[in-house]
Image: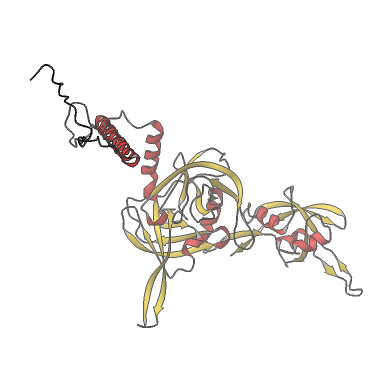
Amino acid sequence: MSAFEPETESRPRRDAPAPVRPTPARSTPGARLWMRLSALLLAAMLVALIALSYRVYRLEEYLLPRNQPSLGVPREVTPREGLSNGEQARIALFRKTWQSIVHITNISLRSDPFRMNVLEVPQGTGSGVVWDVHGHIVTNFHVVRGSNELRVTFADHSTFPARLVGTSERNDLAVVRVSGLPKSITPLPLGTSHDLVVGQDVIAIGSPFGLDYTLSTGVISGLGREIPGQGNLPIEEGIQTDAAINPGNSGGPLIDSAGRLIGINTAILSPSGASAGIGFAIPADTVARVVPDLIAYGKEVRPVIGVELANDSVSARLGLPGVLVLRVVENSPAAQAGIVPTQRQALSGEILLGDVITHIDAEELHSASDLYLKLEKHRPGDTVKVTVLRQGVSHTLSVVLGKNVG
């Protein structure tokens, strides 16, 4: 090639087509967002997996002994030195007394009209206390009410038929008797109730809800409570306790820390029918007074003075400071003491009010119930001081109480 020849250029000619060059791929905004979310989700799953593994590891660390395989192994028993003095005392008290308590089943007889036969239907159950070696057992009247047959089960699980001896509906007490008292059974020692104090420890033993010999502990919560009784007369000097008294405890004993009978469990105050911490027991002094009468006469022997009293509303309407005597029974203690009844004059028809009894043994009366309740603290043959208001003048008379069986 000549030196004068023009140099040939390597770039394409203007009229030649331009070369084709690949362009880089560009992502859309939606694709970029999806990639970011996927990355975040993957990271979150990784973190959760790590945390879960850590928690499982820590759980196994707490549940399983260190450096041991995760197998179920027996726990080592921790020994104790012994029972406390209080526990030992309660256990000894229960062992001393529980065999003197029985389970009573009240059986009623009903006829089946379709098969023309007689069925024995349990009407109710309760508890009872062995009273003496002759087989007499004390319970509640409402436990044996309406019974056609009674069965008594003792601590050795022997069951005997029982005969109803006597009842006092007024005091919710009853006595039944079995023949052939088991030799291992002894009467429960009898205590007193007039010297009890609030706060004393007590236990109640019985068969609540059909369970076999259940012990409940508590204290005396109150004294002198009036327990609702029959004939609009309350049972006075009732014992209130927080020891659980449930259905089936009725008729069972309330026992003091010396193992003595201080009351017969009879009622609870509860809207649900189960123990609510307010239970009542008939005091032992009342039990000791009534039970001998039930054994001897079949009914309670009550002291009387032989008067018929006006209704309390009449005395209140007349503004009298006591109870008005309407009638005096002939040859009664009141007649012999000279108590004057209310009379009507034959000629004028005017009514002359009789004596108004204001006090018994210096204790003020406010109602006829007060008179009967104060007389029940005595026995037939006792002498009481009766204060009467006669024509505005007060007189104190000595009255020897008579006897009324029933």
Give the total number of marks visible in the rendering: 0
Q: Position of residue 305 (x, y in %)?
A: 70, 60
Q: Position of residue 353 (x, y in %)?
A: 84, 64
Residue drawn at x 38%, y 57% as measured from the top left: 210
Residue drawn at x 36%, y 53% as measured from the top left: 212
Q: Is residue 133 visible?
A: no
Q: In the depicted view, which residue is nearer to us: 293 or 154? A: 154
Q: Residue furthest left?
A: 1
Q: Is residue 136 visible?
A: yes
Residue drawn at x 82%, y 55% as measured from the top left: 389
Up-down relation of residue 52 to residue 245 (above or below): above
Q: Residue furthest top?
A: 3
Q: In the depicted view, which residue is nearer to us: 129 or 36? A: 36
Q: Quadrant of the N terminus?
A: top left
Q: In the depicted view, which residue is nearer to us: 80 or 213? A: 80
Q: Position of residue 196 (x, y in %)?
A: 56, 41
Image check: 223 left or right of 113? right
Q: Position of residue 77 (x, y in %)?
A: 25, 32
The type of colouring in the image is: secondary structure
Q: Quadrant of the C terminus?
A: bottom right
Q: Residue furthest right?
A: 348
Residue drawn at x 73%, y 57% as measured from the top left: 367
Up-down relation of residue 259 to residue 379 (above or below): above
Snapshot quadrant of residue 26:
top left
Up-down relation of residue 131 to residue 44 (above or below): below
